Amino acid sequence: MDFVECTCPYCFEQVEMELDPMTSGSFVHDCAVCCNPWQVHVHRDADGDISVDVQRAQD
């Protein structure tokens, strides 16, 4: 599993997110602290490096 640190766009807490090694693309994930929904974008490059962008989910 991959673990990434994200900052919640609602409560601004640092949250560790666990991702399956095959995860890429976009999905909705609830914050473990405040339970608000995030829109998560996961990108993996050819070397396997991962980048994660977290934004407020659209209402």
Image (cartoon, grey):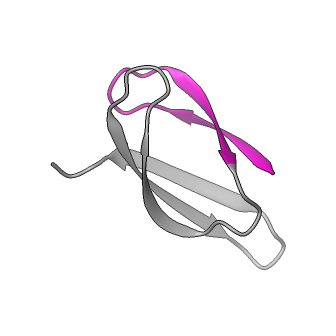
- In the rendered image, the vertical position of residue 38 relative to residue 21, given as above or below: above
| Between 26 and 12, the one nearer to me in the picture | 26
Residue name at image x 63 percent, y 57 percent: 51
Q: Position of residue 52 (x, y in %)?
A: 57, 53
Q: Is residue 10 magenta?
A: yes
| Between 45 and 40, the one nearer to me in the picture | 40
Q: Position of residue 30 (x, y in %)?
A: 42, 38
Residue name at image x 72 percent, y 74 percent: 45
Q: Position of residue 23 (x, y in %)?
A: 65, 66
**Residue 20 placement, left or right of 27:** right
Q: Is residue 2 magenta?
A: yes
Q: Quadrant of residue 14?
A: top right
From which residue to which does the magenta span run?
1-18
Residue name at image x 56 percent, y 36 percent: 6
Residue name at image x 77 percent, y 63 percent: 21
Q: Position of residue 8 (x, y in %)?
A: 43, 31
- In the rendered image, the vertical position of residue 18 relative to residue 51, given as above or below: above
**Residue 55 placement, left or right of 13:** left
| Between 47 and 26, the one nearer to me in the picture | 26
